[in-house]
Image (spheres, grey):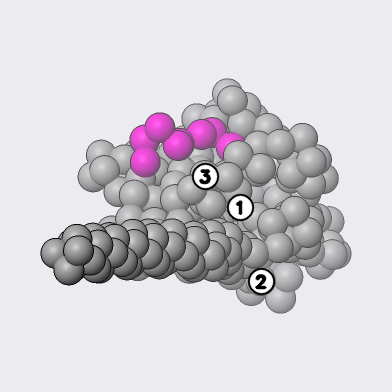
Amino acid sequence: MKLFSKIQRINKTNKIKVELRLIACSMFLLILFASGCSSAVIETPKTEDSKVAQNKPVELLISTAPSLKGSFEEIKKLYSVKEAQVNLVFNYGPSGSLQNQIEQGAATDIFISQGKSQMDALEQKELIKKDSRVNLLGDELVLIVNKDNVTIKSFADLTKSEVNKIGIGEAESVPAAKTTKETLDSLKLWDALQPKMVIGKDLMQVMAYVETGNAEAGFVWDTIAITSNKVKIVATAPVNSHKPVILPAAVVTASKNSEAAGKFLAYLQSDEAMTIFEKNGFIKGN
């Protein structure tokens, strides 16, 4: 009997040990499950962080010709409503100068040139994304005079003795200068008029010469001329007198915001944006 009682006590003890082990395992599994749930809860802020990152403000720097300033002032207001997180910053200057800035590593997201050759040069150096390049707009070369001038009414009138100074852009950086030479060569006037030329660093300076009387006439883009009430257009260069005036646009290879830049460039080709460009004297590119 004593032996039998001892065996019963041992069995009971073993049973208690087994039960304790089962309880311990259950507790361990419960802790693992709770830990897993806790981890799942912690993951939620990461998703929120991702959304915040997507909505983080983006600054797009667009280097472009001064003739586009009026258009972009309107476009910026419209686009800020569509893409509130995008801040558009514009760097205006002669296309040749802007090309040089990009070549030297200046921060730029989009380049819009007033001339094809500047964009071609950047493409050859792989400094723009070739597949993003578009012929965004077109423009026209015009002859302007002071609004009170009654002497000059045509290109031929520039040969008159009373015309002493004719404003033209700097040949190396202002695409309109090349178009002016092509036009005057076509009209057989370049050689006669070249001695009268006064150089402006950009077309705004050329127009200022005419506004102030420092030049009797000047050559600028139509889109520049219509921004001043102090000058008038007396002639437009014949279409067949020069190569087409195209304003190509492209995303710069070094852009750190290429996705946002591509989206804005696509918007510039929309009907809404094109209506603004055309209102300011541009024609749709092709």
Q: Which residue lies furthest to the front in this view?
A: 1
Q: Which of marks 3 and 2 is nearer the N terminus?
A: 2
| x then y, percent, for residue 128 | 35, 45
Q: Which residue is drawn at 68% across and 32% down?
A: 284
| x then y, percent, for residue 70 | 73, 60
Among the 4 quarters of the image, the one containing residue 35: bottom left
* Image position of 247 with respect to 177: above or below: above
Whole-angstrom CA distance, mark 3 to mark 2, is 35 Å
Q: Give the extent of the magenta segment.
A: 129-137
* Image position of 252 with respect to 198: above or below: above
The residue tagged 3 is: 262
Task: Count residues near mark 1 (Cα–Cα under 10 Å), then give few for <14, some for 14-19, many for 20+.
Answer: many
In this view, the mark in front (3 or 2): 3
Answer whether residue 71 is magenta in the image: no
Q: Earlier in the sequence, mark 1 or mark 3?
A: 1
Q: Residue at x 79, y 46 (%)?
A: 276
Task: Count residues near mark 2 (Cα–Cα under 10 Å), then give few for <14, some for 14-19, many for 20+.
Answer: some
Q: If the image is split into quadrants, where does the N terminus sit?
A: bottom left
Element under disc 3: helix
The residue tagged 1 is: 219
The residue tagged 2 is: 208
Q: Which residue is drawn at 71% across and 36% down?
A: 270
> What residue type is disc 3 on?
Gly
